[in-house]
């Protein structure tokens, strides 16, 4: 057994061990029952659309991120996905998440530019 299921089995084994009277953080008898395994998002970075995104956003295509998206599920269907949006990544999806109005409008202009170049001018 490998991958997420092996991790689940290991966590449950540790939880059972910790159930012994007076031991460990799982002494209450809690156990992990479900794991959501998210497919990796591995969209290619050597294609015209990714180059367009990078140029418009003024960034290079990074690989790997410390969070999960539904992009991996699209990837399994053969749909390439890219993470791209306004604001500061360090503030995204946090308890105090916010977006400056200026960042919102900058993002809107970048979306317009991407759509115009990709759909109208056919890069």
Image: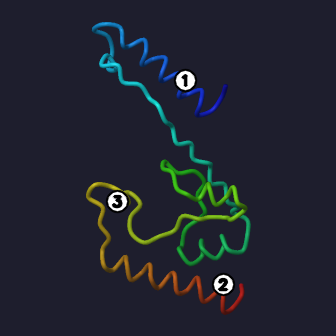
Q: Earlier in the sequence, mark 2 or mark 3?
A: 3
Where disc 1 sits, the SS reads helix
Q: CA distance from mark 1 to mark 3?
A: 34 Å
Q: Residue at x 67, y 74 (%)?
A: 49
Q: Which mark is residue 118?
A: 2
Residue under pointer 3 = 91
Indicate which label's residue lies in the foreground, 2 or 1: 1
Q: Can you say whether 71 is above or below 24 in the image? A: below
Q: Earlier in the sequence, mark 1 or mark 3?
A: 1
Residue 77, horizontal then vertical, whole percent: 70, 60
Q: CA distance from mark 2 to mark 3?
A: 29 Å
Residue 108, horizontal then vertical, whole percent: 44, 83
Q: Earlier in the sequence, mark 2 or mark 1?
A: 1
Residue under pointer 1 = 9
23 sits left or right of 44 in the view:
left
Residue 116, horizontal then vertical, whole percent: 60, 89
Indicate which label's residue lies in the foreground, 1 or 3: 1
Where disc 2 sits, the SS reads helix
Q: Residue at x 71, y 84 (%)?
A: 123
Q: Which mark is residue 89?
A: none
Where disc 3 sits, the SS reads helix
Q: Can you say whether 8 is above or below 92 in the image? A: above
How many numbered markers are drawn?
3
- Proximity of marks 2 and 3: CB atoms separated by less than 8 Å: no
- Proximity of marks 1 and 3: CB atoms separated by less than 8 Å: no
């Amino acid at each position: 057994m490998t991958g997420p299921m092996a991790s689940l089995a290991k966590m449950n084994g540790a939880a059972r061990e910790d159930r012994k009277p007076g031991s460990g953080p799982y002494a209450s008898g809690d156990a992990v029952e479900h794991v959501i395994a998210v497919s990796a998002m591995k969209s290619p970075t050597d294609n015209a659309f990714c180059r367009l995104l990078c140029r418009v956003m003024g960034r290079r295509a990074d690989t790997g991120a410390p969070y999960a998206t539904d992009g991996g599920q699209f990837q399994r269907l053969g749909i390439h996905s890219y993470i791209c949006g306004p604001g500061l990544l360090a503030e995204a999806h946090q308890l105090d998440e916010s977006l400056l109005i200026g960042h919102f409008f900058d993002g809107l202009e970048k979306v317009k530019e991407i759509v115009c170049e990709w759909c109208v001018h056919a890069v």
